[in-house]
């Protein structure tokens, strides 16, 4: 088994508390409303939405994938840290054992936030990741994040 790690950092004018609440804690309510053309629903399959819970994202018709399930490993509203493991569906192909994500929102000097995402791809055997597939997945996640950010900028009283 091999592990390939990617780390990305993005800045936002939105404070960590707001972007965390909107894009992580309340994602199952907000994101399907903001992106109905891409995401049909986000369901809590097991648990209360916190650490130990399992969520399922159901994609809209015409998507490459019908759904993905993931386990929430950590959700800390004090440190704005969110870690989860993709369990099935989506980018989890035969050659991948699992994919883990570590997301951290930190305060920026300008009042906004610095958002760090580390993804780890655990491959089976001598399976090699295709960089293009990873790039496409990262672009989709960033696009979703930018939609939430735009919503928060247009609605300054939301998720305060």
Image (spheres, rainbow, N blue to C red):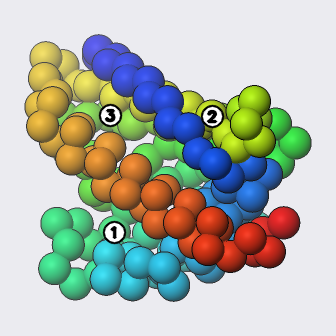
Q: Tell me which residue sits at (41%, 78%) in the image.
A: 35
Label 1 sits on residue? 67
Judge from the rendering whether residue 7 lies leftward or rightward of residue 109; answer left or right: left
Judge from the rendering whether residue 153 lies leftward or rightward of residue 90; answer left or right: right
Specify whether residue 83 is in view: no
| Secondary structure type for disc 3 | strand
Q: Tell me which residue sits at (18%, 19%) in the image.
A: 125
Which is in the foreground here, disc 2 or disc 3?
A: 2
In the depicted view, which residue is nearer to us: 78 or 1? 78
Location of residue 139 with respect to 118 vertically, above or below: below
Categorize mark 2 by other alpha carbons within 10 Å: few (<14), some (14-19), many (20+): some
Q: Can you give x and y, in whole percent of width and height, for residue 49 in the image?
A: 71, 64
Task: Count numbered badges in the picture.
Answer: 3
Q: CA distance from mark 2 to mark 1?
A: 29 Å
Label 2 sits on residue? 114
Q: CA distance from mark 1 to mark 3?
A: 17 Å
Label 3 sits on residue? 97
Judge from the rendering whether residue 73 lies leftward or rightward of residue 40; answer left or right: right
Among the two numbered marks 2 and 1 on one chain, the one whose residue lies closer to the N terminus: 1
Location of residue 76 with respect to 1 vertically, above or below: below
Q: Which label number is shown at residue 82?
A: none
CB-based contact (under 8 Å), mark 1 and mark 3: no
Q: Tell me which residue sits at (82%, 36%) in the image.
A: 79
Categorize mark 1 by other alpha carbons within 10 Å: few (<14), some (14-19), many (20+): some
Among the two numbered marks 2 and 3 on one chain, the one whose residue lies closer to the N terminus: 3
Q: CA distance from mark 2 to mark 3?
A: 30 Å
Specify whether residue 119 is in view: yes
Q: Can you give x and y, in whole percent of width and height, for residue 78 in the image?
A: 87, 42
Among the two numbered marks 1 and 3 on one chain, the one whose residue lies closer to the N terminus: 1
């Amino acid at each position: 088994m091999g592990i390939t790690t990617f780390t990305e950092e993005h800045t936002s004018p939105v404070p960590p508390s707001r972007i965390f609440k909107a894009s992580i804690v309340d994602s199952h309510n907000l994101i399907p409303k903001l992106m109905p053309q891409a995401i049909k629903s986000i369901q809590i399959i097991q648990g209360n939405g916190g650490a130990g819970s399992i969520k399922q994202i159901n994609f809209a018709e015409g998507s490459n994938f019908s759904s993905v399930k993931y386990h929430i490993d950590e959700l800390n509203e004090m440190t704005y840290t969110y870690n989860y493991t993709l369990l099935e569906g989506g980018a989890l192909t035969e050659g991948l054992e699992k994919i883990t994500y570590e997301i951290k929102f930190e305060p920026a000097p300008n009042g906004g936030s610095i958002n760090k995402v580390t993804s780890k791809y655990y491959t089976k055997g001598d399976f090699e990741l295709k960089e293009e597939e990873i790039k496409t997945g990262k672009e989709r996640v960033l696009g979703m994040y930018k939609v939430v950010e735009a919503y928060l900028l247009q609605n300054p009283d939301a998720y305060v």
